[in-house]
Image (cartoon, rainbow, N blue to C red):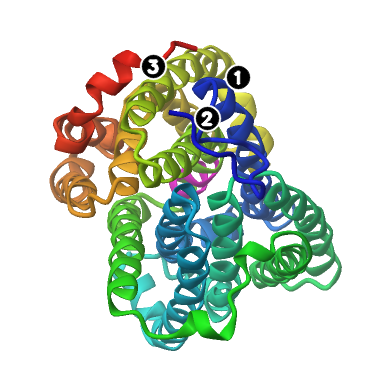
């Protein structure tokens, strides 16, 4: 059955060839991820080259907290947008507008609570993470500035998520490119000219993200008016708000647990000295870039599955997940061949360091983790697809597995095997998560029910 094409969608995810539409939708998301990563990567490059290893380690020591907060913001924004995507897929514009209104109300409340509450725990949290005394002051200066304006980060993720929910992945990229270029310029001004140190990098990031939000809001007001709710759409709807809160906080909790695990792991890394921290920071920044294609595929799948779930097309959902696995396999082969010979050069270029410990540890991390990305190529699509068909518990279970695993590594293995245990920590844990998520998705009754429909569809 052909579903009517929605006129607001730049890419039709409800009809036609699945792989083609997924790739068309994913490419702008990929570039959006790359440019978003440039925010922090340019901070890393400029700080590493101008302020040295100690300042780079100071920013890296705060990375776990930064990822925890950004993961929560991204998670809740993505979760709320899933409900909007389902409404878009089902053709219910009134429900879509009500979901946008609910997203705004929830977003404002959550942002206010986080912004106020987090200021009281930042410094103690850095101490709990065993941040070295010589860098804890700069670490706090960086992360306290970022968290004071966490609302800007949430607003962008929500706006971008809503645009993608209606099939538009291009315009968030356009706005992000503009703000990324501005971020680079502001980094140079605040760090090299005004000598604001790592705090200058945080200020540049906040300003650049604020411009992304303004651009998104302007575009929605002019070209995506389907996303603009009226006063009547803000009426309390208990069932809708329960679903929105459950979906948003499920994804936010999942992201938060994952990043809490990273914070636990960071506490183990911080005990290995600032040179090891600096090498790991550089490697993780590079790893974040390697992750971008996988996340683009997963985020595309999230929107694809949500829209088609709203349209009742389970056969297309099954095939889309399989295509995601295939894309992941191809990406892993290409990235591994690229990373193995170039890892030392990439770490040296990014960090600006001449220290052997920094370069060798960072390169070893990349060479081990790159081929293991295939594990993530199975993990993330399964987790995102489960979320998009309304399963909120089992994806969170996978995050709990990750948190417990990292705690065990920090407690027992890192003290004995040092940085080598850090390198193998995540790939080993990913394997256990894969087992749970693959079983959870493919044995889900809704997914099993679409097996016959999948067989009847014409192959791409």
Nearest to the observer: residue 235 or residue 149 = 235
* Element type where label 1 sits in the image: helix
Give the residue number, with chain letter if any, for mark 1: 342
Any part of residue 178 in sight? yes
State the CA–CA distance, disc 3 to disc 2.
11 Å
* Element type where label 2 sits in the image: loop
Query: Dot 1, how many residues are within 10 Å of its Cα: few (below 14), some (14-19), or many (20+)?
Result: few
Residue at the image point whose x is 55% and y is 81% from the top: 148
Any part of residue 67 in sight? no
In percent of width and height, residue 239 lies at 28, 73
Image quarter hosting the N terminus: top left
Give the residue number, with chain letter if any, for mark 2: 15
Q: Quadrant of residue 251?
A: bottom left
- Circle nearer the viewer, 1 or 3: 3
Give the residue number, with chain letter if any, for mark 3: 457
Query: Dot 2, how many residues are within 10 Å of its Cα: few (below 14), some (14-19), or many (20+)?
Result: some
Predominant SS of the magenta segment:
helix
Q: Earlier in the sequence, mark 1 or mark 2?
A: 2
Residue at the image point whose x is 45% and y is 56% from the top: 87
In percent of width and height, residue 271 lies at 32, 55
Nearest to the observer: residue 233 or residue 370 = 233
Left or right: 233 in relation to 51: left
Q: Is residue 22 above or below residue 254?
A: above
State the CA–CA distance, disc 1 to disc 2.
41 Å
What segment carries the magenta color? 276-282
């Amino acid at each position: 059955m052909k579903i009517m094409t929605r006129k607001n969608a730049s890419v039709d995810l409800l009809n036609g060839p699945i792989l083609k539409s997924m790739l068309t939708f994913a490419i702008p998301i990929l570039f959006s991820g790359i440019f978003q990563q440039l925010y922090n990567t340019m901070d890393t490059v400029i700080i590493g080259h101008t302020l040295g290893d100690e300042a780079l380690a100071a920013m890296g020591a705060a990375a776990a907290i930064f990822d925890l907060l950004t993961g929560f913001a991204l998670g809740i924004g993505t979760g709320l947008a899933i409900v909007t995507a389902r409404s878009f897929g089902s053709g219910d514009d009134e429900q879509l507008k009500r979901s946008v209104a609910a997203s705004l109300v929830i977003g404002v409340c959550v942002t206010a609570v986080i912004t106020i509450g987090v200021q009281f725990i930042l410094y103690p949290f850095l101490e709990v993470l065993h941040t070295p005394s010589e860098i804890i002051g700069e670490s706090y200066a960086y992360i306290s500035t970022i968290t004071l304006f966490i609302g800007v980060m949430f607003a962008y993720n929500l706006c971008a998520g809503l645009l993608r929910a209606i099939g538009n992945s291009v315009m968030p990229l356009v706005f992000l490119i503009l703000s990324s270029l501005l971020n680079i310029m502001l980094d140079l001004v605040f760090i090299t000219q005004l000598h604001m140190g790592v705090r200058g990098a945080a200020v540049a990031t906040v300003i650049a993200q604020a411009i992304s939000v303004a651009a998104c809001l302007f575009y929605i007001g002019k070209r995506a008016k389907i996303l603009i709710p009226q006063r009547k759409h803000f009426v309390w709807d208990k069932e809708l708000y329960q679903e929105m809160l459950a979906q948003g906080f499920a994804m936010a909790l999942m992201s938060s647990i994952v990043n809490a695990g990273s914070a636990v792991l960071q506490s183990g890394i911080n005990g290995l000295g600032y040179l090891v921290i600096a090498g790991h920071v550089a490697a993780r920044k590079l790893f974040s870039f390697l992750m971008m294609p996988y996340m683009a595929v997963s985020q595309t799948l999230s929107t694809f599955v949500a829209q088609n779930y709203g349209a009742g097309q389970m056969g297309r959902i099954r095939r889309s997940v399989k295509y995601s696995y295939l894309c992941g396999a191809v990406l892993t082969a290409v990235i591994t061949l690229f990373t193995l010979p170039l890892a030392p050069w990439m770490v040296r270029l990014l960090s600006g360091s001449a220290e052997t410990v920094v370069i060798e540890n960072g390169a070893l991390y990349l060479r081990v983790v790159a081929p293991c990305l295939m594990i993530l190529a199975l993990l993330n699509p399964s987790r995102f697809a489960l979320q998009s068909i309304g399963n909120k518990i089992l994806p969170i279970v996978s995050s709990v597995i990750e948190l417990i695993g990292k705690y065990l590594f920090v407690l027992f293995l890192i003290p004995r095997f040092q940085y080598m245990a850090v390198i193998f920590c995540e790939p080993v844990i990913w394997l256990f998560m894969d087992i749970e998520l693959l079983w959870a998705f493919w044995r889900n009754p809704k997914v099993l029910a679409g097996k016959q429909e999948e067989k009847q569809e014409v192959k791409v």
